[in-house]
Every structure is written in C-alpha cells, then in structure tokens.
Image (cartoon, grey):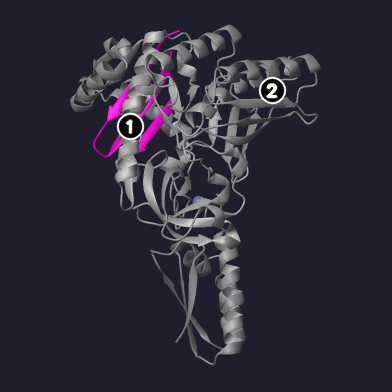
C-alpha cells in the first residue's frame, strides 16, 4: 500500500491531504486568520466565579473571556499532583476572583461564547502524551496486541529512569508508538522534559494573563503525528515550508526526513493529485457510485443521515444482485467520505432494502472491515429491521463543511426557500392586515424580482381584485438586494 502526504502551504492557509494509493483519504485545513487555540496553555486570571453555575470566567489574554466548569478543575496536592480525595464539587472551594490559574483550552471560542478551559494539562509529541498532574502510564487503545502494549510500557519505564524523569508525571503511549524502538521514545521524552521545564518556568513567572505554550502549526503537527518511514513521500509545495519541515524533521523525527520532497511543478500540487476536485465533491450532498446508484449525505445538528439509492432503472432479473452490488459500493464510498468530510457523532445509513439475510450480513461485514482502517475511533451497530445501520465516529477536528462553508443566508440552512407563489400570498395577507390598521391611499410592495414578476403575471388578476376590494393603489418595486422570501410593505 502506498501512502503519500501532500502539503499545500500559503501564508493564509495550509492544507494537507493524506493519499492512499492515489485516493484522497483525509484532508486537513488550517487558516492563519482563525487558527484555533485548542491545546494552548495559558496563565489566566479568574475574573468572576459563578457559584450558581458552578463555573468561572477566566481572562487568558484572548479577545473574549473564557469559561471553566467545576468538572474541568483538577484538585492538586502540594506537589502539583492530582488529589482524588478532593474531587471538586464546589467551585468556590477551588477558585476565587482574581486568582491566578494555569489552564488549557479544550474548545475554541465560537460566536459570542468564549473558549472552554480545563486545568487538566497535557502536551503531546509524536509518540507520547505527557500528563504532568498524574502518575499513570497508559497505552493507546488502538494498539491491540497485548505483547506490544507490555513492551512499550517497559521501554517507557526504562527510559524514565535513564532520563531521570520518574517524577515527571503520567504518560500515554500514542498509536504512532507501535513498533517504535527505545531510542525514538527516549528522544521524545527528552523533548517533553525540555518543553515542560520551560512551560513551568514561565507559569511561575507569569504575573498577568499570557500564553505559556502553543501547539505546533498544521504542517509540523502532521509530520509529528502522521509521518512514518512506511510512507512513500511527503510533497511540499513551498520552499519556505519545506525548509522548516526539514529542520523540524532533523530535530525531532530524523527517520522521516528522507521522505520530504519539494514540489515546484507547473500544476498546483492539489490539482495534480485530484485533491481539489475531491474537496469540491466532498461539499456536495450527492455522491455518485460507479454502478449508477448514489448516496445522499445530510449533516444535521443531531446526526449525519446517509441515504443509499439505486440508479434510475433496476431490472426485475438479478434485482437482488444489483441491490447488493450497489450497497457494497455504497459502503466503500461511505467509509471514504466519512474521512474526507471528517464527519463525526451519530451516523445513520439507510441502505437499499435487501430481502436476503446473507446479503445484509455481507454489506454489514464490509462496512465493518472498511471502518477498521479509519484512524478515528468508531463503532457500528447491527443492521435494524428497516435496513438502517447506526454508527458513531469520534473526531477531534471540525468537519470539512463546517471549516469551508456557512449556513445558506437565503434559506437559513433549511436547504429550501418559500416559492414566489407562497410569498405572493403572504404579501396579500399582509396587505389585508395593514389596510385594517391604517388609512393610506397607496401601498408600495418591495420584494425580490421573482416575486414582483409573479405579482405582475400569474397573480395580476388577484392583485387587481385586492386593489378593488381595499380601495387602494398597490405599486410594486423589485429590490435587487432582497432574498426570495424577504418583502416589505410601505404605506405612502
Ligand atoms: Zn439555501
């Protein structure tokens, strides 16, 4: 299997695509203008404790005041370790106005809401997560082999002694650590030691709200987290970014430095590998299947609904076979789309009804197998009697759609707008209301062009009747800035 990473770097935006045998699997986008602050650690100051909400507002030096809930506060003993005997129940036992606290951002500020904070701190490297307030050593759940889990724990325990870090805190061995030798893990440990010492020094010295630690920008994070020797290539389309990555690799992940390749070809990197098209398709509701069938993917607040449809015509002969083939193809397309679109939460798939129980099992098994290769944690329930499959997928980033799109301003995200006919009748009703309330001789209707056209054409007879009925003149004006549903009635 050949995997490649493409890094498309510009000062305003970095985009990374992970390709598997030429097919886009994952897309990451980070814009400098709204680069999140999740993972950053700050020295903050409690602005106000809210006992009623068991929460507090904290100033961390960013635009809006941040928020911490009592459940995100870790009680510490005098040595800076978690004290489970004092599990926080009452916010006032732990925080008071004006207090200095060290916090980490768990959720970016959104709209008018400030960032969400925790006092449970952690920093990651490629193979390790350091949890300075705990003493626990864990291994990623995605490493299944019990022998490998034991080996990794032993490697880490030994390295902690050698590096004189037995009291550094707790650690988690990340998925990328699987099969990795003691030297690489020790190198990560040394890096964390330097990093945490620097953060602690700055935390002690801080006298006002300030940032103590920021996670790496996307292009470095990707190399830290995803690059491994089994990769085919890492293409980078910016000289500046390439140089930075080379330096980063030399310092932290020398084993993948040789995979870096500067791309200065004529065609844009994402065009060349079809990623640009893939992004455009991933923003469509409909996904075409080779057999002529298609998927419809709808992302709602509560869940993602996926509907599988056959092509236009399914012959009577071999109908069951055609449906099976379409459902299998749909499962493959779905598994890939979930990653490319980065959809999370509850996903409900409505496969085409299959009468044969063996066919149903086959589709379900195929989906399960495909989802096992998805690095995002997921779970699939059995197929319900109605042919629905419920699944969950855990992700840490926003979906592609949420990053690139906003709700449609014309329909407020409903996906449909009222017809011109409906708006015309609303206008007629509004005119009747206004006529009763006011005593003007003339009314003017301002509406979108399509609505005015309809009033002058299909509805012209109704409009004339209405004028006669209310004994007033109704004039019309098309407003180019009006959305199809927007109208105003002015009394002259
Ligand atoms: Zn719309």
Q: Nearer the viewer, residue 419 or 452?
A: 419
Q: Can you name the residue that lies furthest to the front here?
A: 78
Q: Quadrant of the N terminus?
A: top left
Q: Can you name the residue that lies furthest to the bottom here?
A: 439
Q: Which residue is mark 2?
A: 314
Looking at the image, residue 105 lies above or below residue 440: above
Label 2 Cα crowd, 10 Å radius (few <14 / some 14-19 / many 20+): few
Q: Residue at x 61, y 82 (%)?
A: 433
Looking at the image, residue 422 lies above or below residue 472: above
Q: Is mark 2 within 8 Å of ligand 1?
A: no
Q: Residue at x 48, y 40 (%)?
A: 78
Residue range corresponding to the magenta coloring: 1-30
Secondary structure beneath disc 1?
A: helix
Answer left or right for 211 relative to 279: left
What is the distance, in whole Å, between disc 1 and disc 2 at their CAs? 67 Å
Q: Is mark 1 within 8 Å of ligand 1?
A: no
Q: Nearer the viewer, residue 288 or 119?
A: 119
Q: Is residue 22 visible to us here?
A: no
């Amino acid at each position: 299997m050949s995997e490649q990473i493409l890094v498309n770097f510009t000062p305003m935006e970095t985009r990374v695509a992970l390709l598997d045998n030429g097919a886009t699997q994952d897309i990451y986008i980070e814009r400098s203008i709204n680069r999140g602050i999740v993972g950053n650690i700050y020295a903050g100051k409690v602005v106000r404790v809210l006992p009623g909400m068991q929460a507090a507002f904290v100033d961390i030096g960013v635009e809006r005041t941040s928020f911490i809930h009592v459940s995100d506060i870790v009680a510490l003993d005098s040595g800076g370790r978690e004290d489970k005997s004092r599990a926080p129940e009452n916010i006032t036992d732990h925080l008071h106005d004006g207090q200095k606290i060290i916090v980490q951002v768990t959720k970016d500020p959104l709209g008018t809401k400030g960032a969400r904070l925790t006092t449970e701190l952690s920093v990651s490297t490629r193979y390790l997560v350091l949890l300075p307030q705990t003493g626990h050593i864990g291994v990623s759940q995605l490493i299944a082999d019990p022998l490998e889990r034991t080996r990794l724990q032993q490697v880490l325990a030994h390295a902690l002694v050698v590096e004189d870090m037995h009291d550094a805190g707790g650690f988690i061995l990340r998925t990328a650590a699987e099969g990795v030798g003691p030297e690489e893990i020790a190198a990560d440990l040394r890096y964390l030691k330097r990093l945490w010492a620097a953060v602690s020094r700055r935390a002690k010295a801080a006298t006002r709200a300030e940032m103590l630690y920021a996670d790496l920008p996307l292009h470095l994070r990707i190399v830290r987290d995803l690059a491994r020797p089994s990769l085919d290539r890492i293409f980078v389309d910016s000289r500046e970014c390439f140089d930075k990555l080379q330096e980063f690799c030399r310092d932290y992940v020398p084993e993948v430095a040789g995979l870096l390749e500067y791309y200065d070809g004529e065609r844009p990197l994402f065009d060349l590998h079809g990623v640009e098209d893939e992004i455009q398709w991933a923003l469509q509701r409909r996904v075409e299947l080779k057999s002529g069938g298609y998927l419809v993917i709808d992302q709602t607040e509560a869940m993602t609904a996926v509907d599988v449809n056959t092509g236009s015509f399914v012959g009577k002969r071999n109908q069951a076979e055609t449906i099976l083939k379409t459902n299998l193809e749909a499962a493959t397309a779905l598994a890939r789309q979930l990653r490319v679109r980065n959809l999370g939460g509850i996903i409900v798939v409505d496969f085409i009804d299959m009468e044969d129980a063996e066919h149903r099992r086959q589709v379900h098994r195929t989906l399960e197998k495909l989802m096992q290769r998805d690095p995002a944690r997921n779970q699939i329930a059995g197929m319900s009697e109605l042919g629905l499959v419920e699944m969950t997928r855990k992700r840490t980033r926003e979906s592609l759609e949420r990053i690139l799109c906003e709700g449609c301003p014309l329909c407020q995200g409903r996906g449909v707008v009222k017809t011109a006919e409906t708006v015309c009748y609303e206008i007629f009703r509004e005119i009747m209301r206004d006529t009763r309330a006011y005593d003007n001789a003339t009314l003017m209707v301002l509406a979108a062009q399509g609505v005015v056209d309809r009033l002058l054409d299909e509805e012209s007879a109704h409009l004339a009747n209405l004028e006669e009925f209310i004994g007033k003149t109704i004039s019309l004006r098309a407003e180019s800035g009006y959305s199809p549903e927007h109208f105003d009635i002015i009394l002259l």
